[in-house]
Image (tube, helix red, strand yellow):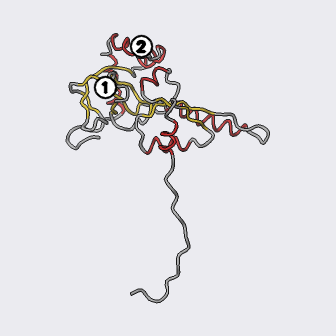
Amino acid sequence: MYRAGFAMRPGADDMACELLSAAAAMPWAAVQMLQGMGADRHLIARLSGAGDLGVARVELSGNGATWTPGGATQRLLIGVRDADGELIDVAALASHCRDEWALRTGDGWALGLDMLAQAEQARDEAQAAASPAKPPRAVRLRLFADPFDWMGAGGAGLCVLDWGLPALTALRALGERVTLTVEAGAQERLRQLLAHGGLPRVEAAHQARGLAA
């Protein structure tokens, strides 16, 4: 979140400049650290080549959900892009805690949105090719618990960074034709997250008798 008078919300150009500066400051030791944590070498090369991976000192917001440049906390930065490849956010990751990260704007709810778009397309193509004698082929989308797991798999899936309404809406919209694959033990928790609330009851209105007091 951005407090009034504290920092203006950055635009895409601002974030791109911040990310490029962080990429230029990325030491080889950080690359080795990522490799040691299991990150895919090809993905590291692709992200680095695109200027989407860097290191910078940041200031975290009070709740740790967002960050701004400067400060004393060093973080690994990774660009968050939409399905069309446009930069929409930058995530600041904590290498000492795999499930701790902050977003620059809060707009980038997931890494791997291109894979989500591919799953949607595969679902539609499978449905179009189906027939009574040939049911639609299975479509699966892998979900990763944290960005480091996502990097370890070469980005071949989706890592949700913010389980807010945009994430829940997009995943629910995939429908029953797409199977979300998660790590063992996480299935029930995800089912609960994606479950819709109960439907309201519907009943006939009773005709009022007499005049209201």
Residue drawn where x is 43% and y is 45% of the image: 165
Residue type at tag 2: Gln
Of 57 and 24, which appears nearest the observer? 57
The image shows residue 35 at horizontal and vertical percentages of 41, 13
Q: Quadrant of the C terminus?
A: bottom left
Residue drawn where x is 26% and y is 22% of the image: 74
Q: Say what secondary structure mark 1 lies in.
A: helix
The image shows residue 139 at horizontal and vertical percentages of 63, 33
- Residue at the bottom extreme, as displayed: 210
The answer to which quarter of the image holds residue 64 is top left
Of 170 and 195, which appears nearest the observer? 195
Numbered label attached to residue 35: 2
Of 142 and 55, which appears nearest the observer? 142
Numbered label attached to residue 187: none
Residue type at tag 1: Glu
| 116 to the left or right of 73 | right
- Residue at the front extreme, as displayed: 185
The CA span between labels 2 and 1 is 24 Å
Q: Indicate whether 207 appears above or below 16.
A: below
Q: Quadrant of the N terminus?
A: top left
Count of labels shown?
2
Q: Which residue is under mark 1?
A: 18
